[in-house]
Image (tube, rainbow, N blue to C red):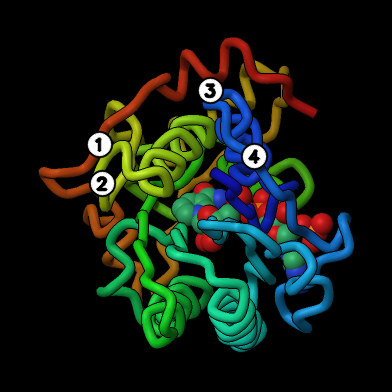
Amino acid sequence: MKIAVAGATGRVGRHIVEAIAERGHEAVAMSRASGVDVVTGKGLDEALSGVACIIDAASGPLTEQQAATEFFTASSRNLQAAGEKAGVRRIVAISIIGIDAFTAGYMAAKVVHERAMRAGRVPVRILRAAQFHEFVDQLMAWARQGDVIYLPKMQTQLVAARAVAEAVVDVATDTATISEIAGPQPEDLVDAAKRLAARRGDHARIEVVSNAADPDHALYESGGLMPGPTARLAGPTFDAWLATASLR
Ligand SMILES: NC(=O)c1ccc[n+]([C@@H]2O[C@H](COP(=O)([O-])OP(=O)(O)OC[C@H]3O[C@@H](n4cnc5c(N)ncnc54)[C@H](OP(=O)(O)O)[C@@H]3O)[C@@H](O)[C@H]2O)c1
């Protein structure tokens, strides 16, 4: 089966490309690095020739709601239109667990992403994932002010990007019907960040903040990101992943 991956160089996209090849399918890597732009549509028609399924693992700006919304609106429209033209049979898009309840920022843009994807004519399956193990480091980098890292209070069932990739390829190839993928156990973001800092030998002070200005702050704090009872739970745990992760 020929499967195109939008966002093929990203945190999860690179693992998806690997998982597709390991299962004996053919992956078409799509990102701006390989001349395919899902926002402008450049290179999409050529990349999708003979493709049976598109996996959408592309992501735009994370910090601004409007820019993220514009990204996902354009990428969904372009992937749907080019997919239909190429005779693609299914699109699998990656989203975030709990997303329906969120109203602001990148999370709100992902609600638009899901809706825009479903508005097209190519049948869509959405796989909602928990926050990736690999994402903790990025959150820490954003939240750093000198020697202090101010992280939001957040409960999340962190999952390895590799486990998300396996699940998304299962959905793409009809090997499993899953709507949510999360890690094996709940984690407190600040605790996870402290373990990551210790492993790296980073002596920054990590402080927890509750951002009352964010209309969704109570959701982050009270389990709004936690998986439901039918989610696939897949290892490794954050600690097992951390033990072998190559950190910058
Ligand atoms: N990170 C998490 O914890 C998490 C949790 C749950 C769900 N998700 C979802 O999983 C998906 C992937 O997230 P990620 O963290 O793996 O993303 P990421 O690491 O930021 O990677 C984004 C990918 O999109 C590509 N891209 C960006 N702009 C593009 C454009 N205009 N045209 C084509 N490709 C473009 C990038 O490659 P180029 O720069 O080369 O174009 C890159 O391959 C997103 O939908 C995200 O919402 C993420």
Left or right of 15 on screen, residue 32: right
Q: What element carries label 3?
A: helix
Against 203, residue 214 (above or below) is below
Q: Which amino acid does label 3 sit on?
A: Arg
* Of callouts 2 and 4, the N-terminal one: 4
Q: Position of residue 69 (x, y in %)?
A: 57, 84
In the figure, residue 87 lies in which quadrant? Answer: bottom right
Three-letter code, disc 2:
Ile
Ligand 1 is found in the corner quadrant, namely: bottom right
Q: What residue type is labelled 1?
A: Arg
Residue at (63%, 64%) from the top-left corner? Answer: 59
Can residue 247 be seen?
yes
CA separation in Å, label 1 and label 3: 25 Å
Q: Pointer 2: what residue?
A: 178
Q: How far apart are marks 2 and 4 (CA)?
A: 22 Å
- The span from disc 3 to disc 4 (Cα, nearest Å) is 38 Å
Q: Residue 26 carries which label?
A: 4
Determine which residue is flagged by label 3. 195
Separation of residues labelled 2 and 3 (CA atoms): 30 Å
Q: Is residue 71 left or right of residue 220?
A: right
Q: Give the residue at x 63% y 46%.
A: 13
Whether residue 75 is situated above or below residue 190 in the rendered picture: below
